[in-house]
Amino acid sequence: MKNNVLAVMNKECSRIFNDRKLFFTAVLLPGIMMFVMYSFMGTFIESMFNIGDDYVYQIHAVNMPRSISIKMADPVHRMNVMNISEFDIDDVKQRITDRETDLLVVFPRNFVIDSENFDPATSPIPAPNVQVWSNFARTQSHEAHSRVTRILNDYHHNLTHRFSVNAPSEEVPDGNFNLATEADMFAMIIGMVIPLLFIIFIFTGCQSLAPESIAGEKERGTLGSILVTPVKRRDIAFGKIVGITIFALMSALVSILGALLAMPRMMGLESGNIFEFYSIAELTLLLLVAGSTTLVFVAMLSVLSAYAKSVKEATAYSMPIMFVVIVAGLVGMVFGGIPTEIFFYLIPIVNSSLSISAIFSYDITVVNIITTIVVNIVLTLALTIVLAKIFSSERIVFDK
């Protein structure tokens, strides 16, 4: 029995080691992909929250004491402090909400005198309160809030002045000075997570169907029967790609719809309805981008499957594309926002990731979305021609 087990084991090991393609895809490639993928993810996540060393934070101040203004003017803080009047407060708040500027700091009148004279043991009124208005959906605003708060805390401890920062008041009873709306916070989180999930769902839907349709029929010998019919090879290729795309897109949309419907509840938002955050026009653009992306994935996998001898081999061939898909889903994090340069939307897969992120982040540039869809369709047509050429090669079609 022992000799039989060793013989079978030796046979399997020899088969795998002698098949260089199988050994690479099954043994080496997963480890290489994991290393590169997590290296990219670390870089992307760091870049997402990284602010350039040359960025200057835009701080609007009301009644700011000169002693604090001098501290904030220190070049190490990289702050541009602009003194405004109380009449401009609402306008600056709106600009912060619209993510056009970073921070608003409102000091009470006579702040220095009141804080020096305040005694928590005897004073019948609350301590002077400094309001720091920010938008946590904007990375620069969030960082500016942290920097200003540290400066105020140092001022408080070093000079023993008595005051509070962002304490609840009649004007703001809940003490919430974050001007980001519920939709802004939702868009910030979903804009980071969903693009990656979206294209992975699309790709896995294509991966489960395309190899079976092409390599599966080739493996069973039925592909040859189809090709001997008088139907043009181009029509066969196009028909297969469109047919697979319909079901792959359905699979992806069902998966992503489940994720989208669960996301508001998972984030603890008052509204649990995704359709309250995005309009029909935005969802239509999303559907068009998803459809064109599915066409590209199906076409790519169909071409690879046509070269494979079996479904298993075709699935192995698709692993490098999966790696590209994951990297593309993360690439938007590198920019700390959605790039508007049209060059990025000429790159397949990357363009889809950026377009999806732009739609979910309310940062749509219609020209870039249209460019993405056109590029995806053109690439699909080119791959369809390649697939038709492969179908015309008996050596490839009947290679087993």
Image: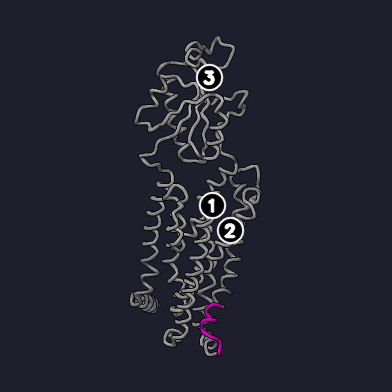
Image location of residue 85, percent across then percent down: 52, 24
- Of residues 97 and 370, the one drawn nearer to the viewer in this rendering: 370
What amino acid is found at the position of numbered circle 1 in the picture? Ile
Whole-Å distance between the Cαs marked 2 and 3?
47 Å
- Of residues 265 and 165, the one drawn nearer to the viewer in this rendering: 165
* Residue at x 50%, y 68% (from the top left corner): 296
Label 3, on which residue?
Answer: 108
Image location of residue 361, percent across then percent down: 54, 49
Q: Quadrant of the C terminus?
A: bottom left
The local crowd at label 3, few if under 14, some if 14 to 19, many if 20 or more residues have their Cα within 10 Å, is some
Q: Is residue 289 above or below residue 312?
A: above
* Residue at x 38%, y 27% (from the top left corner): 73
Q: Which residues are magenta?
A: 230-238
* Residue at x 61%, y 59% (from the top left corner): 284
Label 2, on which residue?
Answer: 285
The local crowd at label 1, few if under 14, some if 14 to 19, many if 20 or more residues have their Cα within 10 Å, is some
Q: Is residue 111 above or below residue 279?
A: above
Image location of residue 116, percent across then percent down: 47, 12
- Of residues 27 and 68, the one drawn nearer to the viewer in this rendering: 68
Whole-Å distance between the Cαs marked 3 and 1?
40 Å
Label 1, on which residue?
Answer: 364
What amino acid is found at the position of numbered circle 3 in the picture? Pro
